[in-house]
Image: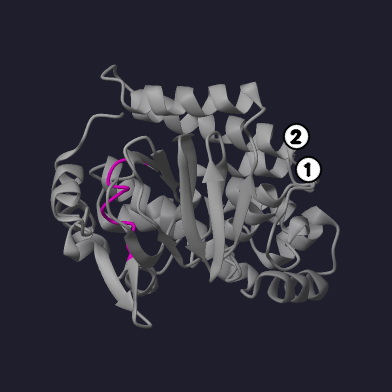
Amino acid sequence: MSNLTDIEREQKKYGSFVPDIPFSSTLIKNDQLELLSNYFFKQQSIYISKHNRFAAYPLHSHQFTELNYMLSGSCRQIINGEQVTLTQGNLLLIGIGASHEIKMLNEGDLLINILFHEKAVAVEWLHQMKNGQSPIIHYLLNLMVNRNDTSLYVLFQVNESQEIQEILKKMIRDYYSTKSYSSTISGLYLPILFTALAREFNQSYNRHAETPRNMAPVLQLIEENYKDISLAKAAERLGYNKTYLGNLIKKTVGVTFTQLVIKRRLYQARLLLNTTNLPISDIAHESGFSNLTYFYKAFKKMFGYLPSEEKKHLNES
């Protein structure tokens, strides 16, 4: 980990920032750099890397969740306009939409970036954890329902937790292992990490609005029945009046029940497009879409390209 990368050598030589991802994987949004998901999550839901030293990383945001683990040394960041200092053993969660700038790291400062998106979070596990007060559980619930207020950050002081330190080190070790399925195994440590954090830091510092904790049963129901679930069926199963449940979901997460279901169906379709050779019409049907024209329209709106372009888009990312 302490060995210099090519980018680090260049940054050390010239003292200025060298971009570490392709220009095609970035976007200028509101006069600020935004890192896109396509570069990091081609065939996996988790991405781990060492942060390059010897130059400051400019102000940016991203379309995914980032965990910063301070393996050694220290690091100063400006997050949403506030200065935060990480010391050895600290863990920082940076939410989608949060703006942060990382000051220059020196030789002995080793910062590990652990990136993941919502598909790395198992709904079944989240449902089991729904009654917890931990800020990380609140954040993940917001993430799963596509709520907009996810631009938070949470600093976990895990210096004294041997358990959490070991989980993080195992994640990193397995991710870089050359053995089969290593990155998959690394990703499986995420719920273990979140559970340990929730148990140890129940009242940890957090910055966000009230979280839709009562949405976990709704998410679980959609996960298990996305192909044919309706608001009426969901209300009956959960013991709510249909109108009340619909209004509760809209008020709590800002989208309708139908929009949540369509989102889940589209992710299933995308998975089938990448793992099977089924015709698109069959994939639409298997994912819960009865209208092929609507499926094409919804897919294009969600992902920015047509279902027929999925594998091509994945290969080019």
Q: Mark number for residue 199?
A: 2
Q: Is residue 200 visible?
A: yes
140 versus 113 height, above or below: below
Is residue 36 within the magenta segment?
Answer: yes
Quote the CA–CA distance across marks 1 and 2. 6 Å
Amino acid type, label 2: Arg
Q: Please identify the dominant SS of the magenta region.
A: loop
Q: Are marks 1 and 2 in contact (CB under 8 Å)?
A: yes
Q: Is residue 293 visible?
A: no
Is residue 259 within the magenta segment?
Answer: no
Query: In this figure, which residue is indicated by the disc labeled 1?
Result: 202
Q: Quadrant of the N terminus?
A: top left
Q: Residue 317 placed where, x, y %? A: 20, 55
Horizontal arrangement in the rendering, residue 143 relative to residue 102 (left or right)? right
Q: Give 317 or 53, whichever is nearer the viewer.
A: 53
Tell me the magenta residue range: 35-44
Q: Give 78 or 314, whichever is nearer the viewer.
A: 78
